[in-house]
Amino acid sequence: MLAPALKRLAVHAAREEDLGAALALIQHESEKNRWIERTADFAKSAVADPEGEYRVCVAERDGEIVGLGAFGMVAGTVGTGMLYSILVAARSRRAGIGERLLFQIKAELVSAGARMIVAEIPGDPTVMRFRALLLSHGFIEEARIEDYYGDGMPQIISLFDM
């Protein structure tokens, strides 16, 4: 049985009318997480060109954007999707919203022909919730590039095979 908050949750492709709230969420989260700086550009691009390289879905509850996910197909590859980020508003965390976003992203990437999903994330404590979500849903750490983002900050490359 779904929690009442999830019953009222709708996850859909970001639309023009969602953009302001999505950008506000990204801005708020970027104050604590510098690794999502490109997510605002992904959101703008996804809304401007829904069939383009970048896609963004939003989680809306009671008319409020409470989360978003940025993803797309990797240009020049056959069947490789990329998961850039999943953000959930602080007051809405631990309610299954990140999971719902991840399920939507997987479904959309499969329908676009993805056979695998790649997530490249820094080994930084500010993104450990995102990494934990990925690991709990079948992503496997395939590679780690030490000092990629700077001294002591590795890049962790995780894969999910469809």
Image (cartoon, rainbow, N blue to C red):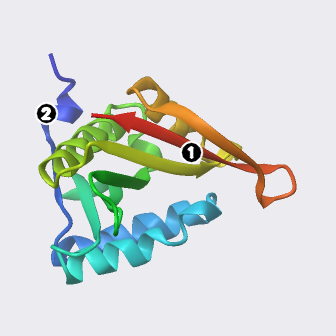
Q: Is residue 21 left or right of residue 15?
A: right
Question: How many neighbours does mark 2 have within 10 angstroms: few (below 14), some (14-19), or many (20 or more)?
Answer: few
- The answer to whether residue 4 is above or below residue 34 is above
**For numbered disc 1, what is the local secondary structure?**
strand
Tell me which label, 1 or 2, sits earlier in the chain: 2
**Residue at the image position 43 percent from the left and 44 percent from the top:** 91
**Residue at the image position 25 percent from the left and 42 percent from the top:** 106
**For numbered disc 2, what is the local secondary structure?**
helix
- Per the model, the C-alpha gap separating discs 1 and 2 is 33 Å
Q: Nearer the viewer, residue 127 or 154?
A: 154
Residue 7 numbered tag: 2
**Residue at the image position 25 percent from the left and 57 percent from the top:** 58
> Picture coordinates of residue 80 (x, y %)?
33, 52
Circle 1 or circle 2, nearest the eye: 1
> Picture coordinates of residue 103 (x, y %)?
24, 38
Identify the image quadrant of the N terminus. Answer: top left
Q: Residue furthest top?
A: 1
Residue 119 showing in the rendered view:
yes
Question: How many neighbours does mark 1 have within 10 angstroms: few (below 14), some (14-19), or many (20 or more)?
Answer: some
- Please count the marks in the image: 2
Q: Nearer the viewer, residue 136 or 72?
A: 72
Identify the image quadrant of the C terminus. Answer: top left
Residue 61 showing in the rendered view:
no
> Picture coordinates of residue 145 (x, y %)?
71, 48
Q: Nearer the viewer, residue 3 or 124?
A: 124
Quadrant of res 104? top left
Q: Residue furthest right?
A: 151
Q: Identify the residue under disc 1.
A: 157
